[in-house]
Image (tube, grey):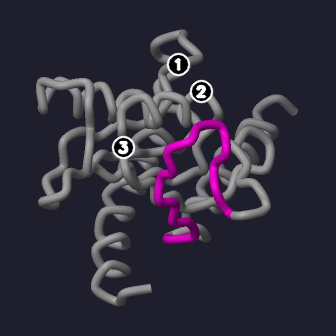
Amino acid sequence: MNTQNSKIDLFFMEIAFKQAQKAFANDEVPIGALVVDGKGNILGKGYNQVEKKKQQAAHAEIIAISRANKKKNDWRLDDCTLYVTLEPCIMCMGLIRLSRISCVVYAADSKLFGYQLDNKGQYSLYKKDIEIKKGILAEASAEILKKFFKQKRMLRG
């Protein structure tokens, strides 16, 4: 991996992680996302708001993509990268594909709801390949999720 790209990916993933921290502070599952265009401009940020909006679709990725669409005034997000602190679910992956996002960088794997890679390391639902990078800030992203669910279990007793 190119060291320059690694630094850029880490920079943007840290911003996505700050969105996850906002979700945590708002008693939402701590996942954050942002959409960045090919020039390095942040087009949209989001964090989970499922509980606040009482909607399953209020995932961080969907909010970030929606804001990017509005800022770009287009539904197509060609040459954009989505940074997200947890592997996207199948719902979000469908939206990512339809939005024409070219790269997804995610931190932690989601064995429960993540849209799993096939044995070739590709998302195989659609023909067009999306570049996938994973593991950037994975430990911190997994840790905040564990902390959130541990607190939830303690509250339930």
* Classed neighbour count for the residue bearing mark 1: other residues with Cα under 10 Å, few (<14), some (14–19), many (≥20): some
Q: Residue at x 76, y 33 (%)?
A: 155
Distance (Cα) linking label 3 and label 2: 15 Å
Q: Which residues are magenta?
A: 121-136
Image coordinates of residue 18 in percent, x first then y, are: 36, 54
Q: Which quadrant does the C terminus fall into?
A: top right
Q: Which mark is residue 101?
A: 3
Dividing the picture into quarters, in which one does residue 46 lie? top left
Which residue has dot 2 on it?
Answer: 91
Mark 3 neighbour density, 10 Å: few (under 14) some (14–19) many (20 or more)? many
Q: In the image as oriented, which residue stretches furthest toward the front?
A: 127
Against 156, residue 18 (above or below) is: below
Which quarter of the image is occupied by the N terminus?
A: bottom left
Tally of marks: 3
Please name which of the two marks, 2 or 1, marks the residue nearer to the observer.
2
Q: What residue occupies the far top of the structure in this picture?
A: 54
What is the crowding at mark 2: few (fewer than 14 residues within 10 Å), some, or many (at least 20)? some
Circles 2, 1 touching at the beta carbon (< 8 Å) = yes
| 90 horizontally vs 50: left or right | right
Residue 26: image location, x then y, percent: 45, 32
Residue 120's quadrant in the figure?
A: bottom right
